[in-house]
Image (tube, helix red, strand yellow):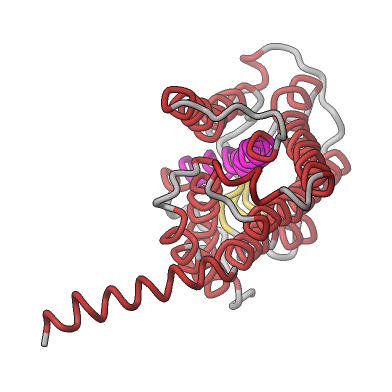
């Protein structure tokens, strides 16, 4: 039993409301998508920890179908959000940048939205190609997605998140170099983006820490699964999806506990990193004070 799972996941999910309040008005698709996908994953983990505490009963198969697909999507959506965030930071910190027009900003937002939400949907569809059966249920952890491990699954499911994570780290390194190269005039360079140097560094740091955690998750999942399930020959689509309705049940004694326990903590850890870096800066605290002051002036006075 892991009685700590549900409280930790619920706390992580609801803490995301703090940075959401501040960053909603900025319209930064990368940040908002990271917050959204982490919230969804944390809530899934919390519900699963309650429903499947001490059992592997097949209780809510439709919930498992949906939640496992969302978990698959989150594995590339969080890195994609960090990638677009870091790419926009690089653009904002470029000494040679041209002030973008309103149409340029709108096009960039459309592209960010596709990358942060459209790409995960495509990835979830591709996962179905190499999904050997419906899902697994692991005691105390709940529903988990499945993959028929083969050469196609490496290219369709395993490698894409790694590519996005590496690209995100690459952009983060460039963003740090831009900061180091022009520290004296950096505030002027960022002026058009609405960022301060401290806020800029917090966003980069958050992305780096999250990507290191996500890369750890990807590597551990791939390593453990390849040890348990050596690469299978790909014959035909029909063979791979034969008996697709099968649901794997893994009680505590026989389940992949080490893998599940390590990977379970990645998303709550990413959430706490997100909350710390996005919510505790001086600029954010000033905005919270303004919000509290507004509530006192307009709401409490009105109620009195």
In front here: 280 or 233? Answer: 280
* One can see residue 134 in this view: yes
Q: Is 72 colored magenta in this rendering?
A: yes
Q: Is 286 colored magenta in this rendering?
A: no
Answer above or below: position of 274 versus 228.
below
Q: Could you tell me which quadrant the C terminus lies in?
A: bottom left
Query: Which residue is farthest top?
Result: 236
**At which x and y percent is residue 201?**
71, 55
> Is residue 37 shown left or right of residue 220?
left
Which residue is located at x 74 percent, y 65 percent?
Answer: 253
Q: Main secondary structure of the magenta part?
A: helix
> Is residue 20 shown left or right of residue 205?
left
In front here: 304 or 197? Answer: 197
> Is residue 178 shown left or right of residue 199?
right
Query: How many badges with numbers are in the image?
Result: 0
**At which x and y percent is residue 40?**
48, 52
Which residue is located at x 66 percent, y 34 percent?
Answer: 91
* One can see residue 76 in this view: no
Answer above or below: position of 36 versus 113.
below
Which residue is located at x 54 percent, y 48 percent?
Answer: 31
Which residue is located at x 44 percent, y 68 percent?
Answer: 287
**At which x and y percent is residue 206?**
69, 56
Answer above or below: position of 235 versus 198.
above
Q: Could you tell me which quadrant the N terminus lies in?
A: bottom right
Res 21 → quadrant: bottom left
Q: Which residues are magenta?
A: 65-90
């Amino acid at each position: 039993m892991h009685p700590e799972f549900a409280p930790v996941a619920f706390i992580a999910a609801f803490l995301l409301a703090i940075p959401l309040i501040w960053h909603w008005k900025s319209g930064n698709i990368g940040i908002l998508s990271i917050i959204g996908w982490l919230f969804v994953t944390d809530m899934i983990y919390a519900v699963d920890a309650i429903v499947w505490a001490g059992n592997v009963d097949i209780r809510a198969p439709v919930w498992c179908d949906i939640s496992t697909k969302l978990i698959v999507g989150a594995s590339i959506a969080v890195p994609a959000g960090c990638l677009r965030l870091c790419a926009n930071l690089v653009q904002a910190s470029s000494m040679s940048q041209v002030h973008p027009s309103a149409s340029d900003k709108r096009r960039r937002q459309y592209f960010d939205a596709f990358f942060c939400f459209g790409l995960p949907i495509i990835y979830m569809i591709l996962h179905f190609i190499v999904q050997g059966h419906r899902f697994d249920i692991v005691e105390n952890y709940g529903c988990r997605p499945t993959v028929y491990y083969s050469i196609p699954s490496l290219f369709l499911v395993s490698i894409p998140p790694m590519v996005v994570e590496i690209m995100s780290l690459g952009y983060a390194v460039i963003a740090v170099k831009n900061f180091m190269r022009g520290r004296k005039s950096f505030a002027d360079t960022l002026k058009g983006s609405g960022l301060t140097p401290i806020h800029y560094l917090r966003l980069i740091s958050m992305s780096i820490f999250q990507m290191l955690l996500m890369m750890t998750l990807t590597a551990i999942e791939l390593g453990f699964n390849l040890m348990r399930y050596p690469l299978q020959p790909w014959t035909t689509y029909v063979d791979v999806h034969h008996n697709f309705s099968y649901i794997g049940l893994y009680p505590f004694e026989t389940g992949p506990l080490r893998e599940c326990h390590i990977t379970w903590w990645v998303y709550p850890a990413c959430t706490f990193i997100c909350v710390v870096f996005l919510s505790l800066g001086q600029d954010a605290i000033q905005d919270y004070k303004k919000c509290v002051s507004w509530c006192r002036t307009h709401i409490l006075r009105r109620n009195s």
